[in-house]
Image: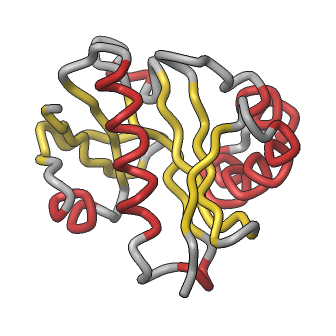
Amino acid sequence: MTIWRIVTIRERPDLAPLVANWLWDAFWHPNGHPMDEVREIIAAATAEVGTPQCFVLLAGEVPCGTANYVAADLEIRDDLGPWLAGVYVVPEARGQGCAQRLVAAVEDAARQAGERTLFLYTHDAQALYAKLGWYPIDETTDARRPVTIMRRDL
């Protein structure tokens, strides 16, 4: 039986380079962002309460996914926030409820910070987030790719 545990980069700064690599490969590299920028962002995501926070899901002691709680995530919608961002699960851990655990951690962090609403945007995971209680509020384009902005009332 797998024992799942969520830690923050504040607790485990040694995980920041790994998380930065995951996020750069999955989201940032295709958009041309430098790896050093991603490393700095993740290493600085150490708020005790509020944003920014980076969460890492461990299966036993093995890191298998991440999610972030950030003030801003989509430049064209800087009127919205805070955001759930950078949800990533390694391929071998998918289908085991990892994303759900990570999303719940960010939602809990937002509640602790006194927030009543969270936002996210996604290119292709609308169905996953809908199952978790999120609903679409806008369809737009980011970097010439269609995205859905979704909302979760806490």
On the image, the x and y values in percent for residue 35 come to 83, 41
Coloring scheme of the render? secondary structure
The one nearer the camera, 122 or 39, is: 39
For residue 80, above or below residue 21: above
Residue at coordinates 19% horizontally, 43% vertically from top-left? 139
The total number of labels drawn is 0
Question: Eyeballing the image, is 24 above or below 84?
Answer: below
Q: Where is residue 11 in the image (x, y as percent from the top left)?
A: 73, 35
Most foreground residue, 144 or 22:
22
Rendered image quadrant of residue 100: bottom left
* Quadrant of the rendered image containing residue 78: top left
Q: Is residue 86 or residue 29 the one in the foreground?
A: 86
12 lies left or right of 67: right
Q: Is residue 96 left or right of residue 121?
A: right
In the image, residue 153 above or below residue 14: above
**Which part of the image, by quadrant, shows the C terminus?**
top left
Q: Where is residue 22 in the image (x, y as percent from the top left)?
A: 71, 58
Q: In this view, does 36 lie to the left or right of 71?
A: right
Q: Please tell me which residue is depicted at 34% across the width and 43% down the height of the picture.
A: 121
Q: In which quarter of the image is residue 47?
A: top right
Residue drawn at the location 54% of the way across and 87% of the way down: 1
The answer to which of 41 and 108 lies nearer the viewer is 108
Q: Which residue is drawn at 33% across and 19% down?
A: 81
